[in-house]
Amino acid sequence: MELLIWLIPLLPFIGFLLNVFVIRRERTAGLVASGMVAAAFVVTLIAVGVLASMPPEERRIVSTAWEWINTGSFQVPFAIMFDPLTAVMALLITGVGALIHVYSIGYMHGDPRVVRYFAYLNLFVTMMLFLVMANNLLLLFLGWEGVGLCSFLLIGFWFERKTAGEAAVKAFVVNRIGDAAFILAMLAIFTYFGTLNFYSEGEGGALGFLERVGDIAGLRVGPNWQPIFVSTAISFLLLIGATGKSAQFPLFVWLPDAMAGPTPVSALIHAATMVTGGVYLMARTEPLFVASFTTQGWVTWIGALTALMAGTAAMAQWDIKRVLAYSTVSQLGFMVAACGMGAYVAAIFHLLTHGIFKALLFLAAGSVIHGTHDTQDMRRMGGLKDAMPVTFRTYLIGALALAGIFPLAGFWSKDEILAHAVGHGHTPIFIILFITSLFTAFYMGRQVALIFFGTQRDPSYHPHESPQVMTVPLIVLAVGAIIGGAINLPVLHWLTDWLEPVLHEQAGEFNLWLALIATIGAVGMGYLGWWIYTTNAAKIKIGGKDPIYRYSGDIWEGMAEAWYLDRLYQRTVVAGFERLSDFLARVFDPQGVDGLVMGVGRFFGGLANSLRAVQTGYVRTYALVFTVGVLLVIGFMLWIAR
Amino acid sequence: MLEPYVPVLILFLIAVFIAVFVITLSALLGPRRSTPRKLAPYESGMDPVGPAIRRIPVKFYVVAMLFIVFDIEVVFFYPFALVFRQLGPAGLVIMGVFFVVLLVGFIYEWKKGALRWE
Amino acid sequence: MDALTIPPVDLGLIAPLLVVVTWATGLLLVDTFFIPVGRKKLTGYLAIAGLVVAGLVGLPLWGVSGSTFGGMVRLDPFALTLTWVFLLIGILSITMSLDYLPRQDIEQGEYYPLIMFAVSGMILLAQGADLIVLFLGIETLSITLYILTGFAYPRLTSEEAAMKYLVLGAFAAGFFVYGIALIFGATGSTRLSEIGAYAADRDLGDTNLTLLLGGAAMVLIAFSFKAALAPFHMWIPDVYQGSPTPVAAFMSVGTKGGALAALVRLLFEALPTLNAYWLPVLAGLTALTMVVGNLGAIAQMDVKRMLAYSSIGHAGYVMLGVMVAGEQRGPEAFIFYILVYALSNLGAFAVLIALEHQGEEAWQLDDFAGLYQRQPLLAVAMAIFMFSLAGVPPTAGFMAKFYALTAAWEGGLPWLALVGVLTSAIAAFFYLRVIIRMFMTEPEGEPAPELNRGLTIDIVVAAAGTIIIGLIPAPIFALVERSAVALGG
């Protein structure tokens, strides 16, 4: 069994190695890469079967390959584990991943760097599996950085497009901010628990930190005038880490830009799997979060705020993929808010269904882009439903699922989150999320109308349906989007029971009235969106404004720019760093030595002038800085020695 | 509190005093009858025409460096000669090692032609 | 008059050092007399052999602790492990020079013995237990480096670099000597242990405390200069850029390792009782170093210069371990970081050399454009080094950085760990730029760079080491753990 679970991440890794070192032909690359991930899916299924045959409270397999760090008190094993939470994540990653690999064969056909593409994709799956299978934070971090790296490489895959490289760097650097907090969280956890393991390694091993969160109960840290609970500090740092990876406020700016990558990548990494890493992290370290009331509040509000901001932003986009990107951010906000409210099962449920139907939407969008010869601006589309029947139908299913229409997958998972918010008295959160879900229906209606209805506004291309290798995955995912909700139906709540050993949650109550109102609202708003953009289809011009712009004005502009968060960073943080770096370069770099001479020269007045008269060359400046340093060091030491 | 260093200070002051005293004295007492010949930089030398900084052949520096090396050697050898008997054979060995190292350097530079003038 | 006696000398304790020095001296003669011009590679091979022999000679000394020369020189596992690391640095540097020198038309036999002498200086720094010996070590290292920096004569930048380094180095050496004098004046000894005992045993009184602190400050400044701590780092970018690339590589890891090894001893054998004074100073310098190094690197378009700034930044991360060397984890983090940094950084420089053609310098970011298409493995190796320097798992660089941060955090400097985490987050940006050029731009029609045997070995060793130590660091950790125990005692 231990060997079996090691196979899961190793299979895609073998695919990666083959693609890097052996394979040179496009066809083999695609087949091997898809085959390896599909094989991993099968192995995962078997592992799940084995897991299910065990008694619920024993459902955790831990396997240590070797001691990773092993010095005195600091021990971290290279250990993976397989428990119910990991199982569902691994199923999603390998299952959806395999479909996306197959789809990529068609989508990437003819690209000069296909082999490299599949190598990256396989590596991504490997790293993602390590992320969800790690039994300690350090290994999780390895996967965490690994997926970030693959994401970086794949966003910049089409580097001929100028924006791709910039978007790649942006994604990586923004994520580094979250990573920095993650590292600090690891340091803190190690300091207070002495281990980074989640759970004990097998029978009789030392307990992992998730099993002894009680140790830090009531412990405080920080300055005397304002100490905070250790649990709050740690969970808050983890939260920052999660906001980076899961694209939450205030770090979501990288995700829309990340759409510069190939569309299957957007589907796999930036919708279904990697961006859910933050949610997974919070679910995994749930005891730490539950221990801190303060952090839970932050989590909830960050999630809700993100959901609303991104939901409104999605309404005003013209780029077919940016709509979906903002929608992803918004849905991730739902999950994060659910975590904050303590509804971890609902969050994971939504994560799973969203993974399926958002992957479907992205792949269908990719099919649209493919069939319209790389058109992404929805103003240039319209009336594609006849030319692309399969894509249209699957897209519609995905849109309905996302909008939360009964009885598709999205309805059940979203409803569970909303019901929890109502049931546990989070009224303001409920209102925000409910409004967001109405917006969701609206922008999906708008998008379907813009792409598939009306007449084709740009006649310069001939749309065509995609080949079968692409449509078959779409159909499979569409089926999943229809029936996916079945895994946690209100009465059966299989998922809740399955995750009970990890998350210890009782099934939430089904709120019939809420379900009714939500469905009616979603249908109404979806129809409204569809109606506005079909009746006004004639007024939409290529490069023109939105029909609603006339009535909403600048608010629409704000939505289109995602409330200017990006520009804010550009003008403050980025510009600030540039100026600081520039300043440092000027002070500490001879290429701009004048700055120092001027500055210090003014400071030392005549002294510097006389120095300049007798000395030439840059060494003087270095010696001057040196001397200033000497004065500071000696002065300081003697000053404290007083 | 820095009492042990008072003599050093006194010595320093005396040195400064003497320097200042001599210069001041000659400036005060010396008669000033200047002639063009006297105003020339080198009263008795040749006319200093040409660049102020002259290029000196690098060989001089090489010789100067060699001189310093052997000078240091001598500085070591004198005290060694004085305590030669007290140190016994161990001292001889150590001095021998020192000498061999010096010798290697000498052979090296000889071979490299540092001693050849042209 | 007391009879003069020569303290008993145990040459066994300095065996590796002895081998390196004797070998280098002999090699100098052998090279001059027997090795004809144009076949100087042979000298290089012999130098490598010497370093390997020195490493082997050290093997039986593992676990031995002792001092000789009247307590001026010390051997313990800490020094021995560092000796091995330094020997490795020397070997890798020589390997990458073998083809570089003839290609640049600057091949002369003296180069290899000089590197060996520099290594001996580093070893002496690790073994020194007396301020005078430390000074000897630092000067042996520095003077050879002055020559090596100017080795690319008649390239002007090289001479300029040598001149700058010499002038500033002499300046710093002056501080060192003056500091020794003051410390001697205060405590009556230059022996580290005796200074420590003196400072611990009695109430120093105002005068002596002032003298001791002043002296300590000056010595710290001299070390800061060698280790490139801001604001004593100004020479680094110019000197690295001007000197022959393998020398820059050697210097970036060598001076840091040597100087900081000595600093560890100085701080924790001579000055532990004064840590209320030096800790804030060093912590401040470290923070400044991390900020200046990493931010300065952002502005660079020249990769060699960028690596110079990055080496300043890394000096800060090494310092994290040095400052808390009183705890068990400090010296461990220090040794581990030096080793890992040596591998990654030497590898990165080796890639630079591979891209460098005769006479023309190919260090601009654009010269890396599309390297993946031209030389996929070279690009992958460079990517590994960049990720390691940036501290991205699973490379060794991440392990080292994480360990250093843990050490600082636990050693009571959490705010410094915070600065370290934040600056390393920034650092990703400029390392990434190189990767972008390599993987995400089209090649600009240049011929594939030459890759010869020495460089290939270097790059492969460094890349493999970087990855393996990242994945299976436990053996190395076991080694450094045992090396650090001795120091704590």
Image (cartoon, rainbow, N blue to C red):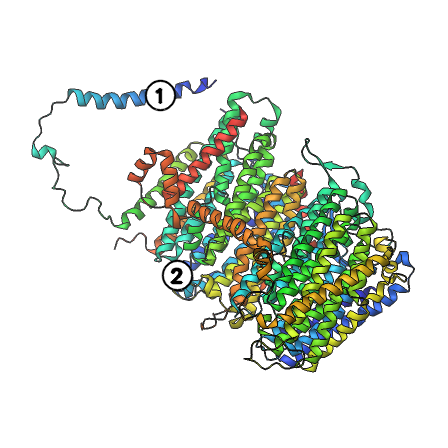
The x and y percentages for residue C489 are 67, 37
What SS does tag 2 mark? loop
Q: How packed is label 1: few (under 14 Cα within 10 Å), some, or many (20 or more)?
A: few
Provide residue C460's location: percent of width, then percent of height: 58, 65
Amino acid marked by disc 1: Leu
Compared to A517, does A396 lie above or below? below
Q: Residue at x 56, y 80 (%)?
A: A461
Q: Which residue is mark 2?
A: C106
CB under 8 Å between callouts 1 and 2?
no
Which residue was labeled with disc 1?
Answer: B11
**A34 or C217, nearer to the observer:** A34
Q: Are marks 1 and 2 on the same chain?
A: no
Kind of residue at disc 2: Ile
Instruction: Name the chain letter of the residue that bears numbered label 1.
Output: B
- In the image, residue C177 above or below residue A427: above
Considering the numbered disc 1 on the image, is that residue within a helix, a strand or a loop? helix
